[in-house]
Amino acid sequence: IDAGRAAAAAAAEFAGACGVCPDALDELGGVDDVTVVGGSQLNGTTTVTFRRPLVPSDVAAGLDRAVSLSAAAVVLLAVSDTSDRVLYHDVRCAVRVDVTAGTVSGGRELTEIRTTHAVIMSVAMLLLAPAGVFIGAFARQRLRAYWFRLHIGLLTTAALLVLVGFVFAFHYVGTSSGAHFVSVHAATGLFNVLLVVTTPLLGQAANVRWQPDRKYTPWWPDRVHWLFGYATVLASFANIFLGLHSAGGAEALYYVAFVYIAALVAAHAALKVYYLRNELH
């Protein structure tokens, strides 16, 4: 990669703000302490060599961090597939480097943790949760007494999977950067977890308070449960795209997710119109 051209473009884009190496920008008073920069490629392996002080000169100004000899340091690795211009990195991971022992760990393990998190959340919020919502909204008469068992079974399983996926995400961040809930995806994910926990509780409250001879469906807790259910699914849909962006997902994944989610929303809207028209007639 043309390091000089990339650095100039990054400095122009992120001058005076956070971004690519803000500690090395003159406008912020930072100092570039990295020396002996070099690299090579051999048999498909890229090697980058550099030297950096354990305690950089701009640590006191809060623009850099010291490397501890008593604990492993987190190193972020990012690679783009082109050198034409500064682009979003296609491959990213974090590893822990023990300077004293000379060991590196965590790269592949972290990638596996992130992939597991994505798969669990996708199964929960793209398959199980929409199925539970569709059954609760449109299949009561057809399934009769079985609809509630399927509805609560699917959504409870989805909620449990979301909690498991949340644990994987928390472990991933704690093992890599340690900065929890600072990204939009992480903050939205926490909000979604709260919705996932609250919605089944409201549903159980509605079940306990249900009376067979009631004349109408009350707002509390029944209709509130419905609103929380829709909010949970829609928030999860939005967070899926935020997660793809955070992970640097391939463009094809955006299209697949968009088409699938759009199909779910369109099917729900069509069924809703169909049932409303039947009720009016």
Image (tube, rainbow, N blue to C red):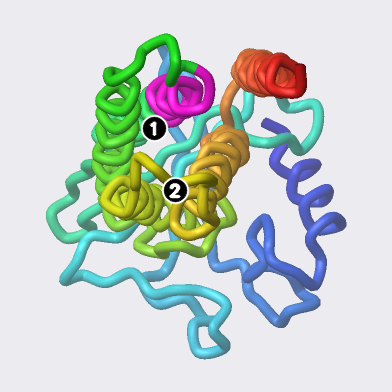
Find out whether residue 163 is within the magenta segment.
Answer: no
Local packing at callout 1 (Cα closer than 10 Å; few below 14, some 14-19, many 20+) is: many
Magenta span of residues? 125-138
Residue 3 horizontal/vertical position (percent): 70, 41
Magenta segment: does it hold 136? yes
Q: Are marks 2 and 1 in contact (CB under 8 Å)?
A: no
Does residue 228 lie above or below 134 as drawn?
A: below
Rendered image: mark on residue 94:
none
Observer able to see residue 88: yes
Residue sitting farthest toward the bottom: 60
Which amino acid lies under the numbered mark 2 shown in the image of this protein?
Answer: Leu
Name above or below for residue 241 compared with residue 186.
Answer: above
User: Which comes before the other along the chain, label 2 or label 1?
Assistant: 2
Which quarter of the image is occupied by the N terminus? top right
Residue occupying the point 38% across, 23% down = 128
* Outermost residue toward the left in this view: 101
Label 2 sits on residue: 76
Query: Where is residue 171 shown, x and y percent of the image?
Result: 26, 50
Kind of residue at disc 1: Met
